[in-house]
Amino acid sequence: ASLEVQPKPSVISWPTGSTGGNAFMVAAGPCGVESREQILTAARFVKRHGAQMLRGGAFKPRTSPYSYQGMGREGLELLVEARAETGLPIVTEVLSPEQVELVAHHADMLQIGARNAQNFALLQAVGETNKPVMLKRGMSMTLEEFLMSAEYVLSRGNLKVILVERGIRTFEKATRFTLDVSAVPVLKSWTHLPVWIDPSHAAGKRDYVTALALAGVAAGADGIIVETHPEPEKALSDAAQQLHEHEFALLMKKVRAILPAV
Ligand code: PEP
Ligand code: MN
């Protein structure tokens, strides 16, 4: 991952856009896929407001085993339907090595969640695929440890890794996690891999999401991944932090004020 090995930034591309170098990407959509109507509605409006990728969890890594666990395979099929209609590539989470083949068959990018960021068997398994991997920083990981997790993927031959700062654990309770904005310049001084910000899981409350997203963009992030839902109050996971459509539209407008090309 080191700039000493590859001094030039890595660029990862899809038909709708690229990330890394001078190219910026926005991935947006609900926390989880909940129904056909929900994901198709979200896909249509995130595309209309300028996102280049659709997010949505089919397998959800919930802190409690009694919370909503996602639609599973059916959710993957709905994401594929949303991609067919909108042309947006899809990013979705994979929870275990056994799921990698199934998720890689459907998705355009494999998401490794914060809770699995040091699941080395899983990192090696996605490293055996040819799909880009979006690796979230574990909530208690140092940046050095984060890069070592990326190395688990790279060392298996998959060089398409995106690093995502999504907030870390601190003593502060006003937000769900503390967005470590300094992760962006620090990681970018060490690695050629693209660095994204996830303002949604850091904030935990929709009112703070836009400010954190803009902070990440201004700090030099190569992309953002944001949660937005047609009816956030009714969401089955992360209801408090998902943006309404009009809030997402405004966020995109503000991102374009910093980066006119997006
Ligand atoms: C998510 O993206 O919905 C998610 C569970 O994120 P994280 O792994 O960063 O908590
Ligand atoms: Mn979520």
Image (spheres, helix red, strand yellow):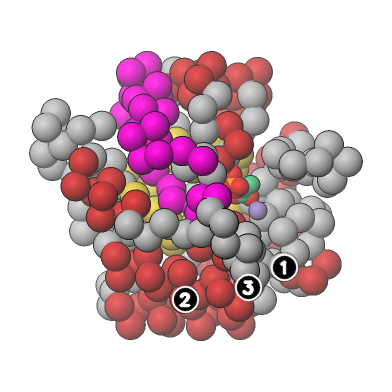
Picture disc at residue 252: none
What residue is disc 1 on?
Answer: 240
Label 1 packing within 10 angstroms: few (<14), some (14-19), many (20+): some
Magenta-span inclusion, residue 60 = no
Q: Which residue is mark 2?
A: 211
Check disc 2: other Cα within 10 Å, few if <14, some if 14-19, many if 20+: some
Residue type indicated by callout 3: Arg
Q: Residue at x 37, y 65 (%)?
A: 216
Residue pictured at 26% horizontal, 50% vertical: 186
- In percent of width and height, residue 184 lies at 31, 54
Q: Label 3: few (<14), some or many (≥20) within 10 Å?
A: many
Q: Earlier in the sequence, mark 3 or mark 1?
A: 3
Position above or below: 137 against 105? below
Label 3 near label 2: C-beta < 8 Å?
no
How far apart, in angstroms, are the residues tagged by discs 3 and 1? Answer: 6 Å
| Residue 153 in view (yes/no) | yes
Residue picked out by circle 3: 206
Residue 17 lies left or right of residue 81; in this view the side is left
In this rendering, position of residue 126 left or right of residue 21? right
Nearest the viewer among 226 and 261 is 226
The magenta-colored residue range is: 140-169
Q: Earlier in the sequence, mark 1 or mark 2?
A: 2
**Is residue 225 positioned above or below 65 on the image?**
below
Q: Are marks 3 and 1 in contact (CB under 8 Å)?
A: yes
- Which callout, 2 or 3, points at the residue further toward the start of the chain? 3
* Helix, strand or loop for disc 3: helix
Residue toward you, 247 or 45: 247
Residue type marked 2: Ala
